[in-house]
Image (cartoon, rainbow, N blue to C red):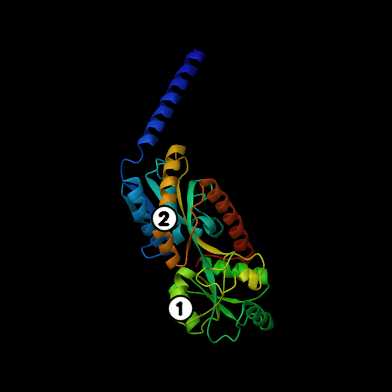
Amino acid sequence: MKSMLDGVRGLLLGTCLVAAAAGAQSYPTKPIRLLVPFPPGAGADVVARTLAQKVTEGLGVQVIVDNRGGAGGTLGAAIASRAAPDGYTLMMGSIASLGTAQGLFKDLPYDPLRDFTPVTLAARSPSGFLTSLNLPAKSVKEVIALAKGQPGKLNYSSSGGGSPSHLGMELFKGMAGVSLVHIPYRGPAEALNALVMNEAQVEIQSMLSATPFIQGGRLRLLATTGVKRMTEYPDVPTVAEAAVPGYAVYTWFGVVAPAGVPKPILARLHTALVQALTSPEMRKQFANQGAEVVANTPAEFNAFLREEVVKWNKVISDSGARVD
């Protein structure tokens, strides 16, 4: 009896594997949903729509952007995590929905590392270390000296409690050993305008949002937060080389699928995404927005994601940061 049952199980398993392989070979046969856990116009949405059009051409089926904003990106991410792992639902993940959410939300309805299959880190953008034009400091070192000389007297603006701009400055504060007062605003536009009006004196903000203010001469860019200087600003140092060795912060966006997507489908998706991302026109589009294409492997994205979760969990714990 036992050998008969084992034979039936083996037959069923083999049938399932054959069916899965057949499905993977024909994939895709219908439109793919690219879920964005933020409203239209947000950074993740811009990246998703830029990418969706090109991937549609490569896969031969339409990639439809589906915005499901709310709860700091966690509402849409929870929906994506529960989708069928068949390759027809993807998510444009980001530092907010995957990198910092676990540390900020006590009852997060998904696990950023367990409930998703990383496909590729699409693009990343360093932030700018910005100051009001009224601040006398002309370098990061001078900002640090000013802050140490007047503890708690300088304000820094952010896009809101728990936002990347907030946590990026908390990381800076800890590594530089300075005291700054946090003033949260509702989004990057309000935070940047507060700096223009000198309601705050310092800010770390994504270059995707800050570039118009910099180019318009309304804010001073002292440094960028990547591991290397930006091509568009070759004379502007990184925070690490200017004053705080080892400091690096990026706003990043990457495509993930629900956990359990078959490897052949994952490989097909990865190939299509990388081909789209590395095309000359896509590289140019992202560069114009202050971002750089990454297009790494699923394994590399997985390792990066794990490092980000550990990094930001510590910053959140050390600083006591919370979501407004």
User: Which residue occupies 49% across, 18% down?
Assistant: 6
Q: Is residue 197 shown left or right of residue 67?
A: right
* Element type where label 1 sits in the image: helix
Q: Are marks 2 and 1 in contact (CB under 8 Å)?
A: no
State the CA–CA distance, disc 2 to disc 1: 27 Å
Sequence order check, earlier mark of 2 and 1: 1
From the viewer's perspective, is residue 191 above or below residue 13? below
- The numbered disc on residue 130 is none
Q: Looking at the picture, tell me which residue is in the foreground, 219 or 201.
A: 219
Question: Which dot, 2 or 1, sits closer to the camera?
Answer: 2
Q: Looking at the picture, tell me which residue is in the foreground, 314 or 117.
A: 117
Image position, residue 79 (x, y; %): 41, 50
Disc 2 designates what residue? 279
* Element type where label 2 sits in the image: loop
Which residue lies most toward the front here? Answer: 280
- The numbered disc on residue 215 is 1
Regarding residue 79, the answer to whether it shows in the image is no
Regarding residue 117, the answer to whether it shows in the image is yes
User: Which residue occupies 53% across, 82% down?
Assistant: 132
User: Which residue occupies 54% across, 69% down?
Assistant: 166
From the viewer's perspective, is residue 94 above or below residue 229? above
From the viewer's perspective, is residue 3 above or below residue 82? above
Q: Is residue 43 shown left or right of residue 315?
A: left
Q: Amino acid at mark 1?
A: Gln
Which residue lies most toward the top here? Answer: 1
Image position, residue 200 (x, y; %): 53, 81
Q: Amino acid at mark 2?
A: Ser
Image position, residue 145 (x, y; %): 67, 81
Q: Looking at the picture, tell me which residue is in the foreground, 58 or 26.
A: 58
> What is the number of callouts on the image?
2
